[in-house]
Amino acid sequence: MLVQKEYQMFTKGRNKGTYKFTLNPCNGAQKVCLAGDFNNWEPVKMRKQKNGGYGLTIKLDPGDYQYKFQVDDEWLLDPENQDNALNPFGSLNSLAKVL
C-alpha cells in the first residue's frame, strides 16, 4: 500500500487536549484505521475527508504514545513521522510525543 506524503503526522485538534491524526493513502483504500497504546491497539476507523485523505481526532493527555495506521488490513508506520519505537514483535511503531 503506497501512501501520499501530504500531511503532518498529527496536529492539535480544535478542542483542548485533542489531536488529529491524518493519512492520505493511495490506490483507493477501502478501510483506514488508527491504533495505538492509547486505545489498547484496537483499530478505530478514520473518517474520509473532503480532500480524499482520512482523519481521526482523539483526546490525548501529555506523554509518549506508540501508534500505527491500518490500511486495508496492512499495518503502516506514519510516513510523516520520523520518530519510531521498537515494539515487542521486533518491528517499529510510530511515536507521538504530546506535550
Image (spheres, grey):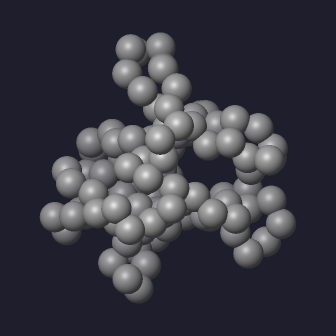
**Image vertical order of residue 79 relative to residue 65, above or below:** below
Q: Residue at x 30, y 51 (%)?
A: 71
Left or right relative to 29: residue 97: right
In the image, farthest residue toward the front: 82
Tell me which corner region of the image, top left, top right, bottom left or bottom right, holds residue 56.
bottom right
Say whether residue 43 is visible: no
How many tags in the picture? Answer: 0
Residue 94 appears at what percent x and percent y?
Answer: 49, 38
Q: Position of residue 47 (x, y in %)?
A: 46, 70
Q: Quadrant of residue 95?
A: top right
Residue under the image location 45 percent in, 58 percent down: 45
Residue placed furthest toward the left: 27
Q: Name, please, the residue furthest toward the bottom.
A: 50
Q: Position of residue 13 (x, y in %)?
A: 70, 69
User: Where is residue 57 shown, x and y percent of the image?
Assistant: 62, 64
Q: Which sits in the foreground, 9 or 44?
A: 9
Left or right? Give the position of 17 relative to 11.
right
Say if residue 64 shows up in the picture: yes
Q: Give the vertical position of 9 relative to 24 (above or below).
A: above
Please tell me whether residue 74 is drawn above or below residue 31 in the rendered image: above
Give the residue at x 27% y 44%: 73
Identified at 38% across, 14% down, the residue is 90
